[in-house]
Amino acid sequence: MQPTVISPTMKQHIDIKKVGVESTEVLAMLGRVTYTESHGMYIENKEDLFIYNNKAFSINKIKESLQTPNILYHILYVDELPVGYTKLILNEDFETSPSGKNCRLERIYVLNEFIPMKLGKLLLENVIQSAKELSHDHIWLSVYVKNHRAINFYRKNDFLDIGMLNFLVNGKDYENYVLSKKL
């Protein structure tokens, strides 16, 4: 079954909101679905994916994260429907981060059905603006080496390679590029 393609010419109301614990369930579900959509095809053992999702996107894990002062979440809404989100960790360095005040864009996801609307760019612009307002001068992130769509997106938005790191999914390493952008 093909996902519905939404025409960019259609008029939808788009909103990005900073959220707190009241959005725990929405973030848990968005996280689980968007991670599976964007990374599920790369994880060979689907049981590993299921175990990872249960840990990373459990209600308790998301609630704990939402209550952490240096973590900011934003949800992207299209016609009041939550379709994407970001997770920004303030004052977070990577071993080869440029000197200054760094933050980490740990998650930026949009449901596959809404990707043709180019909403990732809006989410990225919003999170960059938030980081600037909080006096950060660099933002960094990691991206799986086989996720070419995401790598191209970040490079088109002026992110530069600064290193590598391994991301664990149920004990299995997945190699990631680390990219950074001066704000």
Image (cartoon, rainbow, N blue to C red):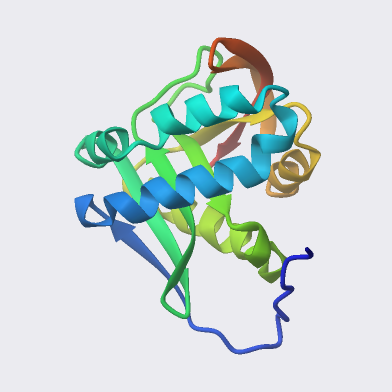
- Is 104 located above or below residue 135 in the figure? above
Q: Residue at x 64, y 28 (%)?
A: 46
Query: Which residue is rendered at x = 47% and y = 45% of the image?
Result: 31
Determine whether 158 is above or below 2 in the image.
above
* Residue positioned 54% across, 32% down in the render: 140
Q: Position of residue 178 (x, y in %)?
A: 63, 24
Q: Is residue 79 visible?
A: yes
Q: Is residue 159 visible?
A: no
- In this view, 113 is above or below 38: below
Q: How many marks?
A: 0
Tell whether 39 sits left or right of 15. right
Name the side, left or right, on which 174 lies relative to 104.
Answer: right
Relative image position of residue 161 (x, y in whole percent) = 70, 26
Query: Where does the N terminus fall, quadrant-wise?
Result: bottom right
**Res. 55 image quadrant:** top left
Please state which of residues 32 and 86 is positioned toward the viewer in this rendering: 32
What percent of the width, then of the height, locates residue 24?
28, 49
Determine which quarter of the picture holds residue 144: top right
- Compared across the picture, whether 19 is left or right of 171 comes to left
Work out whether residue 79 or residue 162 is closer to the camera in this orientation and state it.
79
**Left or right: 136 in relation to 23:** right
Question: Where's residue 110, x and y in %?
Answer: 58, 56
Residue at 47% from the left image edge and 21% from the top image edge: 99
